[in-house]
Amino acid sequence: MKKLKGKFGYGIGAIGLDLSYGLFYSYLAKYFTDTLDLNYWFLLLLTPLARIWDGINDPMMGTIVDNTRTKMGKYRPWILIGSCCNAVVLSLLFTNPGLAPDGLGIHIYVAVFYVLWGMTNTMADIPYWSMVPSFTSDPNERNIIATIARTFSGLGQGIISILTPVMLPILSVTMINGEKVADSKGYSTWAIICAIALIGFSSLSVSRTKERVITAPTSEKFSFKKIFKVLTSNDQLRIFMVFAMLSNAGYYMISGVGVYFFDVVVGDPSKQSTFNLIGAVGSVLGLAVVPVLTKFISRKRTYQTSLCLVLAGFTGMLICAKAQAYMIMNFCYLLASIGVASMFVSQTVFLADIVDYGEIKMGNRAEAITFSMKGFLQKMAYTIQTIILFSGLIISNYAPRSAEKLTYTQAEQNTITFMMIICPIVLVTLSLIVFSTKYKLHGEFMENITKQINEKHVEFKEEV
């Protein structure tokens, strides 16, 4: 019971992280285009340029975490510091200080806080997920820990996806055609509420989690040479980066373009709340897929099954969208969400396995550096989403709804439908191919690595 409480104490921190994460990745683009009226070409360039800095900052933060030594441990201090900083930045990012929408000032303001959000999110996200392999080397225990953490992560995402379409009009004051629509005040107030919750959940998690030290401490300083060595020496980490980035980008297309889809194509933004609610139910159901299926089939088959569920759901969504059967489309999203949730659980476990593989192959675990790649690949997946999204908006000559424009063109509707459903199908299919042909950390090969890790850790404990 005590161990279970510890696992739940750890997992609850994911709620706060995903409140910030979900608001940023699912609603920031709509806020930029429809509320701040920013230049689309500027937005198209901003995201990939920010990733250049993330490529330096994320592994740098991983190294800092690896070398942190405090009475609280090496992970928990950074979770708390990073969450507080990220909460402040999130509030400011969604708040316009009164700058003109077409001026240079608002574009500089957005660019600065956009980059700062990525940095502060990294400060909390990397140490949080890096704790998974430090708890235990037992694969079944890791499945449980990852599942619990992903459950709370899904809850955070669910709060954002279900409540945001409802809360934004309530907190806003702008009226179009007799209806309240999301405006700057609504976004700012909702972001501040989420920021306060982020600090609360992170503080609770830190206070309820006890770090375990099962490996020898490191004292290496940050160096690009070390990061380069980890990336070049750990071939499975590189492969993981590719297939996880592709599948995550497919999911982000749904969550990021969805706010446009229900406004432009469906014509009723409030229906997104029902769509996301059904998706949240699927996410909860999907968390049971990995623990259940791994009792009967291998991890490899379990992950392939997850991706096939995603593809089946997306394909059904495409058929329903063409037939304008939006209610049935919701239940296709339920199936896809089951696959997405189990996919994320497996990916968390894969990273823990990759840490073990790296220790055997290189003699160095590099936990935080390896897990920093998780945050970086998610940002790269988001970059793929934003490049496709803003390119589509430019090509279709998208313009937000206003008192002068109450309907959308057929080109806008077709382009957004394509980005919402067809692009995810392509991205997830490519991910499945890469995973099935290149990833090898499963079966007897992984069992041998786990055996060596356990023997090595026993020797370390005996020396201590």
Image: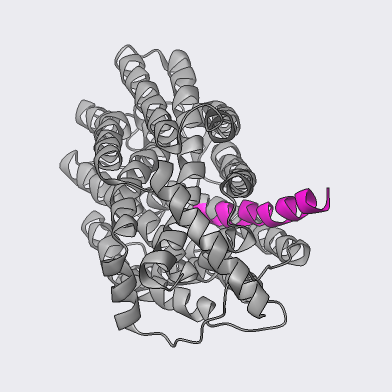
Q: What is the basis of the colouring in this image?
A: one colour
- Choose between 464 and 402: the one closer to the eye: 464
Dominant secondary structure, magenta:
helix
Q: Is residue 125 above or below residue 160?
A: below
Q: Position of residue 151 (x, y in %)?
A: 62, 42
- Asked whether residue 266 is in view, the answer is no
- Choose between 386 and 66: the one closer to the eye: 66
Task: Identify which residue is drawn at 46% across, 27% down.
Answer: 268
- Verify whether residue 198 appears in magenta: no
Q: Is 45 displayed left or right of 150 in the figure?
A: left
Q: Which quadrant of the figure contains the C terminus?
A: bottom right
Instruction: Determine which quarter of the picture holds residue 217.
Output: bottom right
Task: Identify which residue is drawn at 53% across, 69% down.
Answer: 89
- Choose between 385 and 90: the one closer to the eye: 385
Q: Position of residue 231 (x, y in %)?
A: 30, 67
Q: Is residue 436 above or below residue 136?
A: above
Q: Is 35 displayed left or right of 281 in the figure?
A: left
Tell me where the magenta segment starts and ends, as one range: 1-21
Q: Position of residue 180 (x, y in %)?
A: 54, 38
Task: Identify which residue is drawn at 73% across, 63% down.
Answer: 209
Q: Is 361 displayed left or right of 365 in the figure?
A: left
How many numbered discs sit on the rendered protein? 0
- Verify whether residue 6 appears in magenta: yes
Q: Position of residue 281 (x, y in %)?
A: 59, 28
- Asked whether residue 384 is in view, the answer is yes
Q: Is residue 331 above or below residue 125?
A: above
